[in-house]
Image: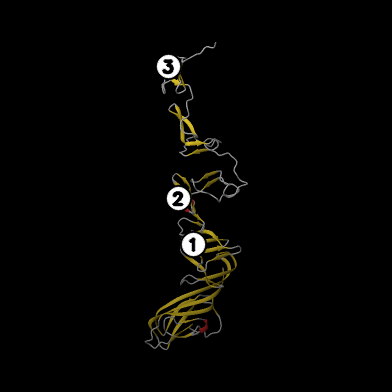
Amino acid sequence: MANTIKIRRSATQGAVPTTAQLALGELALNTYDGKLYAMNDAATTESVVELSGGAPGGSTTQIQYNNAGSFGGLSTLTTDGTDITLSGRFISSLNGAASEPPGSFTGTWFTTGGDATTTKPQLLIEPSGTTSTAWSTNGTGLGVNAASGFSGNLLDLQVDGTSYLNATATQFIGPAGSVFTGGSPGITLKGATNSGLGANAGNLGIWAQGTLALNFASNEIRFARDWVFSWSSDPNNNNVADTIFARDAADTLAQRRGTNAQTLRVYDTYSSATDYHRIAIATARATLSAVSGASVTATGLIPAGAVVMGVTSKVTTGLGTTNSTTGYKIGTVADDDRWGDITGTAAGTSSDNRDWTAGTIECFPAATDIIVTAVGGNFDGTGEIYLSVQYMAGQAD
């Protein structure tokens, strides 16, 4: 007949033997709890330890952990046997090492056989209840999908607390504050009000202060109607423009800068500033103020070597008529009305090539004065006349 061996035992729920009740090597069983105990004298300190696994803690699907020596269930980490769901914080303090990233996703990306809804990213950040339906059917590594109305950053890359690239629902903000959007311009540079680069009717456009200033088409570079092409004397382009080309009208190119006389040079040869052959198309100007007497002189207004193409005038301040002045003539000492005998004294009275009395174009080898002579009576000192000379000159050095 088989022998029955019984060890020290208790049927009281929660009863645990003490060190005084157990000898080394002796076992004790709590038949109510189903737990087995033994004496442990590690490091000369005696204690009673539980040998049995014990009952699982927590609820179904919760992953178990050591809860002060007993099983506990993690409510924030659950599994259905296939997927693991984390609803709490995930903190990793593992340092990186060569070829050993603290975290990695090594599975094969889903890249074929799905549509824009089912081809999900390998790593997807998406609030519960939000649906994403616009993924690449060729696969996506990292995807972020925010709920409608989200106004924060989808992505923010920083160095030492300074943001260098971030993405919102409507734009990228890149290096030095450059902004990338879906509008016009598509790329806005920091410090430039609504200015940058973007697409325009299939072409590359450059915007300045909200206006499409420059358009790069397939075979041309086109300025906006009211924009000009200009240069500055500063190599860093920080000074105001001192040379400007502008559109006056259809098929009309102008070189102008306020009241500054202009010169256009066309070169036959140019080796240096002291070795060239060229023709210059230029202007010279003078303002005769408080005109008085029988005549007034614009000394040397025609430069030496000038082939005069035009001499024009305009009364900018009305000529006084106390001396019965009725107009003025424009010419030289040799021909006092060569470029016009003009009737009128009011501000706005003007003359051009249509007023010439001489029908030939003349070259003036030496600098020449232009004489403005009063008609009907002397100038009384209360008017102002603006003169402009338009000329060409062959030049060499």
Choose top left, top right, bottom left or bottom right for residue 395. bottom right
Q: Which mark is residue 44?
A: 3
Q: Is residue 279 above or below residue 140?
A: below
**Of the residues under marks 2 and 3, which one precedes in the sequence?**
3
Disc 2 residue crowd, few under 14, some 14–19, many 20+, Cα 10 Å: few
Residue ID for mark 2: 152
Which x, y percent locates residue 68?
A: 43, 27
Q: Decide if residue 265 is in sight here.
A: yes
- Tags 1 and 3 in contact by the CB under 8 Å rule? no
Identify the residue at horizontal 49%, vertical 62% (top origin).
Answer: 208
Front residue of 101/195: it is 101
Which label sits in the foreground, 1 or 3? Answer: 3
Front residue of 160/238: it is 160
Front residue of 337/244: it is 244
Disc 1 residue crowd, few under 14, some 14–19, many 20+, Cα 10 Å: some
**Of the residues under marks 1 and 2, which one precedes in the sequence?**
2
Which x, y percent locates residue 133?
A: 55, 50
Amino acid carrying mark 1 in the image? Ala
Amino acid carrying mark 2 in the image? Gly
Q: Is residue 198 above or below residue 382?
A: above
Residue ID for mark 1: 208
Q: Secondary structure at mark 2?
A: loop
Amino acid carrying mark 3 in the image? Thr
Q: Secondary structure at mark 1?
A: strand
How many circles with numbers are drawn on the protein?
Answer: 3
**Of the residues under marks 1 and 3, which one precedes in the sequence?**
3
Q: CA distance from mark 2 to mark 3?
A: 60 Å
Q: Secondary structure at mark 3?
A: helix
Q: Is residue 323 left or right of residue 4?
A: left
Q: Is residue 338 above or below residue 142?
A: below
Which label sits in the foreground, 1 or 2? Answer: 2
